[in-house]
Image (tube, grey):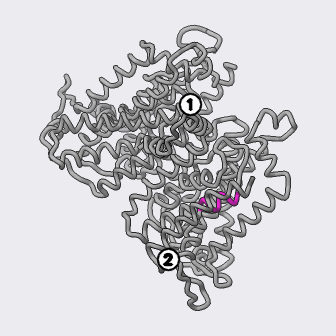
Amino acid sequence: MSTVTATPVRGGWRQARYLPIAASLALLIIAYGFGATRYPAFGDGQVVLNILIDNAFLLVVAAGMTFVILTGGIDLSVGSVVALSTVLCAELLAAGLPAPVVMVAVLAAGAVLGLGMGSIIHYFEIQPFIVTLAGMFLARGISYTLSTESVSLEDPLFVTIAQTPVELPGGLRVSVSVLIAVAVLLVAGYVLHYTRLGRTVYAIGGSNRSALLMGLPVARTRVGVYTISGFCSALGGILLTFYTLSGNSSHAVGMELDAIAAVVIGGTILTGGSGYLAGTVLGVLVLGVIQTLITFEGTLSSWWTKIVIGALLLVFILLQRLIVGRAR
Amino acid sequence: MSRYRLFWPAAALVALLLVNLVLSPSFFSIQVRDGHLYGTLIDILRFGAPLILVALGMTLVVATGGIDLSVGSVVAIGAAIACAQISALPDQNSVGGVFGAFGIALALCLVLGLCNGFLVSVIGIQPIIATLILMVAGRGLAQLVTGGQIITVDSDPFRVLGGGYWFGLPAPILVALGVVAATALVVRRSALGLLVESVGGNPEASRLAGVRARGLLTLVYVFCGLCAGLAGLMVSSNVSSADGNNAGLWIELDAILAVVIGGTLLSGGRFSLGGTVLGALLIQTLSTTVYTVGVPPESTLLVKALVVTVVCLVQSPAFRARLRRRRKPPAPAPAEPAAKVEVPA
């Protein structure tokens, strides 16, 4: 539970707590530079934007995960909640509900699920790991019970949002999902770094006891971060339906690992209390660049992605361990 | 105390079996064909054997206050290595070749367990995170070994481990029971179990008492890796193939569930091997019941979610304290706890 914030100050970017974030930035630049020198097409601006388009939903989910991990918790249910949201979208639209109502309902469902898990974690003092594991079973179970097949979405609003490109200067394009993801990141960054809620999140991660003794609203905040994560997962699910235009209970299997990996590679410490949302964005980009690199290599072996992500996780966790150890 | 702790999982198992008796009377029929036993109950034991093995390893890890998320990946790696070795043999039916493949697969799983143990005990990383690394990378490794394909083998000696019969009983049951018995003997007839529990109960106090936590921690992760590897051999032998993608998928969750149902506290400090075996059998019976009753198999996940929640709530001191407080006022409301359990839904 020790935090890096207690590091002896050496000032500016040389402070130890910036080291992981600097490392992931360096990694991103190296990976991108490697790709750009090896394949001329890799340097194209649209390839970079495609990484954002392909990972918009992961950005949103990982932002929610950052809140949870900063309090020292973990949320294993995110992948299942994403899948559940896509299925709910499909089923509710099929039931004849108007698209805006469906979106609000799905977001509410995700938030309520997170609220429930957060309440159990906080009030019954059960480890977040096991509660969100049950949540993972539950969400996946509900979505399988609703539908085992892939249902395609034909609602005009969903199709329009999915297929409308957002033109950028220079003939580049992004999707609407990317704009939504950027908006979520801006809001999340503001909340985390400039509000009372954000400071309480860091305080709880630093030391739950101290936060309690200081009279901070620990209960509200701890339940709140899981609610935020549930909401972000549901939103991620909606963004995924824009991407695939389908609801499928087998979507996003293992996505919780990608989200956790992105947060860790972004330099947030898993015991909580130290990290930045910007790091999480870098983490998602690193994963995206690696994915694109492997696609460009043309080996078509998704297993290399897993092995590389595992190796990166190892390196970054060892790096964190080194820094935390020195801070003591 | 121990008898009391085994009561609930045993009662749940009996209740589930009774439900089956009502729903499908043929559930309990056991036939003898060619000197082998056949029947649904035997199948539960046979298909439950890998889960028993994985959960056995997990129990000791959980007893130290840790958790091993990588077991599913280790199952897949063990299966992949063994099948890759056997398929490369000039004669797939050679007993020596099959044993050699077993040896290589198990040795690798031992090394993987050693890696987990090293990260947890020497580097001091949280167990969830340390084993998460292998969980992510391991499935990639398994797919690398199988080349992303499903390796099928045609080897009679290999098939025995998962599908064979010894003394009229399916071999996997006997292997799993043998490992459980040997473990129980080593852990409970020596001080090893006590030491593991002391490390889980209070690491600082046991360090002051001179317990070498480092070695013990490494040992339990190595044991867990070996158990998972053996389970992987069983799973692949049963279907005569290795699938890097799907072998052992979700088994870590079932194993953790079995351990928790068996009465081992997730915070560590004490464990019950018998409880874990009962828990694993309960989960396997649950899955089989869902299939035989004709409920869509997807619902197993829902049932498991409810079981995990209820078991954890019952184990939680905070929850029990709340219940007690609520019962004291004049009108005790028995419906209240049930309603509380539904909330996570």
- Where does residue A59 sit, x and y in percent of width and height? 37, 32
Magenta segment main secondary structure: helix
Residue at 69% x, 60% y: name it.
B274
Does B273 sit left or right of B235 as displayed? Answer: right
- Identify the disc placed on residue A314: none
A17 left or right of A251 in image: right
Q: Nearer the viewer, residue B201 or B160?
A: B201
Q: Is residue A327 above or below residue B250?
A: above
Q: Is residue B136 above or below residue A172?
A: below
Measured from the top left, where is residue B237 in percent x and y?
56, 72
Of B72 and A26, which appears nearest the observer?
B72
Quadrant including the C terminus of chain A = top right
Range of magenta residues:
B273-280
Res. A33 in view:
no
Using residue A65 as the reference point, say whether residue A159 is left or right of it: left
Q: Secondary structure at mark 2?
A: helix
Instruction: Classify residue B38 by image quadrant.
Output: bottom right
- Residue A270 is marked as 1
B182 is within the stretch colored magenta:
no
The residue most toward the right is: B210
**SS for callout 1:** loop
Residue B279 lies in the magenta stretch: yes
The label nearer to you, 1 versus 2, is 2
Report the front residue among A51 and B292: B292
Q: Which residue is mark 2?
A: B27
What percent of the width, then of the height, locates residue A12? 54, 9
Amino acid identity at mark 2: Phe
Q: Amino acid at mark 1?
A: Leu
Residue B312 image point, x, y percent: 56, 45
Which residue shows up at 52% across the image and 21% down it? A218
Q: Are marks 1 and 2 on the same chain?
A: no
Q: Residues within 10 Å of mark 1 (few under 14, many from 20)?
A: many
